[in-house]
Amino acid sequence: MPPNEPWLLRSVEVGTDLVDCRIAEGRVVDVAAGLDPLPGEGVVDGAGGALLPGLADHHVHVLAMAAARASIDLAGATDLDHAPAPEGSGWLRVVGAGSELTRHDIDRHWGDRPVRVQHRSGALWTLSTAAVEVLAKGLAETERESGQLWRADRRLGHLLAEVDDGLDAHLADVGRDLAARGVTHLTDATPDLDARGLERIVSAVPQHVLSMAESGGGPRKIVLPDHTAIDFDEFRATVRACHGQGRPVAVHAVTATALAVAIAAFDEVGTLSGDRIEHAAICEDAAAERLAELGLTVVTQPTVFARHGAKFRQESAPAERPALWRHAGLLARGIRVVVSSDAPYGDPDPARTLHACATRPDEGVRADVVLESYLLEPNRLEAAVRTVAPGAEASLCLLEVPIRHALAAVETGGSLGVRATFISGKCVYARDFKSL
């Protein structure tokens, strides 16, 4: 079935009503019962399935998602003896090395293939000899000799952008997989994503992409460090400068100290509609009360805690454990809490986030409440949820069943059952989709 509009989706659930929905020129044109097909329309029987606004993930790292698909994880191994050696001659990305490798170590295992290996600390990338030769113009002499690049993520990213590292194909796969899960909007939270990186993403994925980088159009991402001293004056000045431009900020705060610093800065500078706290990973009652008073939104990542909660608890002081990655407790204090994935660190499937929230023994939140996060406008989290109504953008998600059945399936570990996804009127994913 051709992907192009116009469309007539018949017998779909919108809210509590069973109606037909007409899509044309990238917009919802009509929502009513008994609409007659027009010449040239693709007509689909929705069979009573829910028709939702397309789902929005409000905190992801798209390039990292693509890179993760192309990566080999050494899981802390100190040598390469048992590392896989996949066929092919293109770039290979390896993470999780447990020792500081040189290019000669890599050459012995992967031969003359261009390879980059990241130490598990994240501070070191080591290039194979073939990779050094490709990137030589951008490397210092000592780096060419050892293959080691210390604390050079951004520079390495720029160097790789000049060569075909195979990432574009993986970006396209990311976009397709997200479309199959009903995701139509992405907010990329990578703070140093440059214009070239954003263009690379936008060219490869069908989703709408909002960037929080300095040159992006979303709230400005500011990272408060987890393990080093925070320069309060510099942070406060950055917040004030962004507000002066009419731009809200998104503050990464994982520690209790970072959250306290963020609150102190907002106390002095004031808040702007759209200001948000990313993670609020440790949020005690006193801090929660201040967030509520300031009107700040918390953007949390339930599957990050589902994956790593045991580790977080083990590494936290006993007094901090009840404050880890809170959700229900923040809602109860009147804080607007918005869920996201933080993929690839969390699970990009919205169904897994809904399940993690609904089944958490403490801080649990019903799936229907959590779903509303996905229906928010990415650049207006404080506004009402998007709806399927005449004039709305036709970025939509059609489910196989009514919403109550889909949410019941998710709460027991199933999928949302996405049948089709439209972005600006174009069908970008369809399953068992036949025109009448």
Image: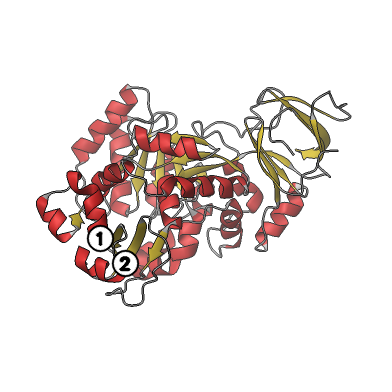
Does the rendering let one see residue 345?
no
Compared to residue 10, the image places residue 81 above or below, namely below
Specify the quadrant of the image occupied by residue 54: top right
Compared to residue 427, the image places residue 100 above or below, namely below
List x then y, in percent, for residue 356: 56, 59
Q: CA separation, marks 2 and 1?
A: 8 Å
Q: Residue at x 78, y 50 (%)?
A: 401
Q: Are marks 2 and 1 in contact (CB under 8 Å)?
A: yes
Quadrant into which the N terminus falls: top right
Q: Amino acid at mark 2?
A: Trp
Compared to residue 349, the image places residue 311 above or below, namely below
Which of the two discs, 2 and 1, labels the residue nearer the N terminus?
2
Q: Residue at x 26, y 57 (%)?
A: 130
Tag shown at residue 315: none
In the image, is 422 to the left or to the right of 344?
A: right
Question: Which residue occupies the foreground of this view, 259 or 239?
Answer: 239
Residue on which the image places disc 2: 110
Compared to residue 311, the image places residue 327 above or below, namely above
Tag shown at residue 128: 1
In the image, is 162 to the left or to the right of 181?
A: left
Looking at this view, name the residue that lies furthest to the left: 141
In the image, is 252 to the left or to the right of 341?
A: left
Q: Amino acid at mark 1?
A: Ser
Looking at this view, name the residue that lies furthest to the bottom: 81
Question: Which residue occupies the foreground of this view, 363 or 118?
Answer: 118
List x then y, in percent, for residue 3: 69, 35
Q: Secondary structure at mark 2?
A: helix
